[in-house]
Every structure is written in C-alpha cells, then in structure tokens.
Image (cartoon, coloured by chain):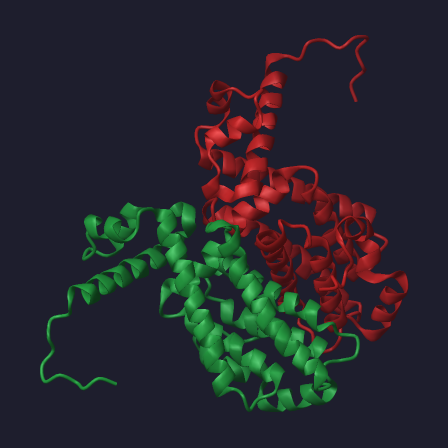
Chain colours: A red, B green
Amino acid sequence: MSPVPDSPSPPPRQARAAATRERILEAAAADFAAVGYHGSSLSRILERDAGVTKGALYFHFASKEAMALAVVEAMGDTYRGLVETAARDDAHLDPLRRAARLTAGIHDLLWPSPVVRAGVRLSGEGAVGPAWSSWPTRFWEATFTALFVEARERGELRGEVDPVAMGRFVLDISQGAFITSMVTTGLADLAPRVAHNWEVAFAYMAEPAWQAGWRDEGGMTAVMRHHLEQGGDVDGGG
Amino acid sequence: MSPVPDSPSPPPRQARAAATRERILEAAAADFAAVGYHGSSLSRILERDAGVTKGALYFHFASKEAMALAVVEAMGDTYRGLVETAARDDAHLDPLRRAARLTAGIHDLLWPSPVVRAGVRLSGEGAVGPAWSSWPTRFWEATFTALFVEARERGELRGEVDPVAMGRFVLDISQGAFITSMVTTGLADLAPRVAHNWEVAFAYMAEPAWQAGWRDEGGMTAVMRHHLEQGGDVDGGG
C-alpha cells in the first residue's frame, strides 16, 4: 500500500489511457453481449458511449476482432480471480458445496459488468478463434472435474457416477442454459434454469446422506437466492 | 405417383432453378456450420462450390442474411417432418422412449446434410432475428414437454419431478452439448455427450420400474449405437 496523497493529482497519461481503454472495452462488451459478434460494429460501439472518440477507439483496438479478443481475455482474468477467491473463502466447505457456490459466483459476474456476458456469448459463437473459443469450456471443465474427483475420494458421489463425465455435464447444462435463456427470454430466466439444472445434477451424482443435508439447507435456491428473487422461482412454473 | 417416362427429359426451367437454389443453400449451410454467421461471406460460399455462379447466387438470395434465414427455415421444415414421422413410427412406444428416439433422430439429421448443423449454430448465435433464433428452442421444448406430461399421466415419472421444468432441462443439455462439443472438438464428441446427458435426465426423472426396463434394453447407448460407434463411448473416458 502506498501512502494516500494530500490532494488528488491529475492522472498521468498512462493511467488516462488505461481508463479510456477500459471504457471502450465496456462499451464494446455491452454491444457484443446485446447483439453478438456479427451484429456489432465499431460505429455501433461509438454510439453507445458518446465520450469515446473514433481516434481513441482505433488507437486502442485495430479492429472489431481485436476488441472481441480483449473482451474474452478480460473474462479469463475475471474467471481466474473468482476461482482464486473461492478457493480461499470456501476452503471450509466440501467440494460439491464449493461447486454450487462457484456457480453462484459466475452468476454474480454476469451483472452488472457486460464483459463476462459478452465473453460467454463470443466464445460460444466461436467468434474469437479456436483457442479462445474453447478456453472457457476447458477451464471450467477442469475446475469442476477436480471438485468432483475430490468428492469421489471423500465418498460423496454415488457409486456409478463418473466424475469426469460430470465435469462435462455441468458445462453443458451451464452453456445450454445461457444460450436457450438468451434466445428465448434475453437471459431473464437464466437464474431459475441454472438452479434447476444443478439440482438435477446433485440429485443424480451425490450420495443420499449429502443430499439430505443439502436439502435441509435449502439447496441451490438458498445459494442463488438473490438472483432468483430478482428473476423468478427455481421450478419456473411454466 | 406419375408414370416413369421412357427417357429422362430436360428439367423445365422451374425445376432447374429450384435445384440451383438447393445447391446454393447446401453450400451456404456448409459454410455457416463451419465458421458461423460472422465468419461466413458470399465469396467464401462461392468458393465452396465452383458450379454456383455469382449471378445465380444473387438471383436466389439478396444477402447473407436472406441465406441464413433460408437455412433456418429449411431446418424448421426438417424438424417438423421428423416429429411427424416419429409420431407415426414410434406410436407403439411409451413417451420417454419416444423422447429418446427423437433425440437420436435429431442426431441423424446433423449428418450428412449441413443444413441442420448450420441452423442450430445460427439460431444459437441469435444471428437470424429474435423470432427464428428462439424458434428451435420453443419448438423442441413444447415437443418434449408434451411427452413428459404424458409420462407423468402414465405414472412413469418420479413424484417430485416437474415435466415442464424437464422440458427446459433437455433443451439445455442438448443445446449446451452442441456448443461445448463444437468449440472443443468440432462436434467429434457430440454423440457421447448427448447420450450421457440423457442418461442423467432419465435417471433423475423416471420411475425405478421404467429405469430397470430401460437399462435392460441398453439405454441411450443402444438407441444411439451407430452414432456412438463412429465417435466414442457414452462415458467418454476422459
């Protein structure tokens, strides 16, 4: 920690440039999240934020492609930060409960910043090249699989359950919920979809004793309560 | 049925035009399936099929957008045809087995024609306007929900299972498997992902007696055998 100065001094040129870049990135992410890669354009992004000039935009990003890549890279940093924080804050919990809280944590990142929402959409579209498009899937698959392998070692999975297959399964239910919710409700029903999908996953994979304790605590509805209260109930009604 | 002529006569102008349109649509679908809406272009599509001229292409489709819409409409026709055929051919089966066979039927449509693969990708990208982008999700959700409601009435679902929520669930596991498989393996592991996801769905929702019979028959592995033998095994190993 550096000492706090008596009065704020004008930000140096480098800090100003970084702030401008950040501002452009947010405007670009908002546009990518709303209309996807193909629907977005540099002129649309400029319209989103009147404070960003065309010159500044081209100074920081040579193309729409470069901007999309920067959004997905920023999402990557955010994801790695979440996993590090969760490993520290949730160390006292068993691995299945850590998986549930990570899912709620990802949900926390989707609002209010558009960067993660845009990153999920861009990578799902395959719009940022093969390596970056597959990165979020690979990253979360490895993260969740490690938790499920730990749950297996602790005897918290049912006998026939394959932790590696379940690592892929939770990616499919998450990515699938994002896409179907986006195209049908503009993400309005994402939280109840995700909560329900994870309840099915836990009901399938966890030992009966673990499930009994989980239900007593309120399950995914309790873990994602503040998202569900904004959007709807976990069963979704119909 | 009209009588077969002695020798083939040259196709009338209208039939030739329809054949050319079909050929352009297949080339466009192949390109959309491979690189998505944003990556595709009219010049890339012309490169895919040297027999299609620029003039013919513009005669049939005014823009890339019009072509994407035609691909998704063709997918819609194919889906409706599948559901009609299945309702006739599988009428002797119970609703959960009909759901399993519909899933294998959708898989049959993904190869060899690129139209359905392209349609799934374009609608998931939200690249064809809100109405068409949500159409496949709504269509399959309604189709599967009706089957699960019927299973509920026949006492083939476990007590706590909500057939409407399961209609959304199977859309998420299908759309999710398509996206994650596409970005990580170019769809090579789609069949084992889908088969595993449906086994989890059945294990969660079906009555124990139904599950016992289903396992005896070989489950999803039996229903999707010819896809799985091409691609991998249902547990996927790791």
User: On screen, B163 above or below B27?
Assistant: below
Q: With B77 as the anchor, is A71 left or right in this view?
A: right
Q: With A146 as the anchor, is B195 left or right in this view?
A: left
Labels in figure, total: 0
Residue B98 in view here: yes
**In the rendered image, which quarter is residue B69 located in?**
bottom left
Specify the farthest residue to the right: A216
Q: Tell me the quadrant of the picture where the C terminus of chain B can be found.
A: bottom right
Residue A25, percent across and down? Answer: 57, 31
Q: Tell me the quadrant of the picture where the N terminus of chain B can be found.
A: bottom left
Nearest the camera: A190 or A138? A190
Residue B208, percent across and down? Answer: 73, 86
User: On screen, A207 above or below B27?
Assistant: below
Q: With A157 as the anchor, is A17 left or right in this view?
A: left
Residue B238 in view here: no
Nearest the camera: B172 or B23? B23
Residue B132, percent across and down? Answer: 49, 56
**In the rendered image, which quarter is residue B15 located in?**
bottom left
User: On screen, A31 above or below B24?
Assistant: above
Which residue appears at 55% of the width and 66% of the height? B139
Which residue appears at 29% of the width and 48% of the height? B44
Residue A33, percent across and down? Answer: 57, 42
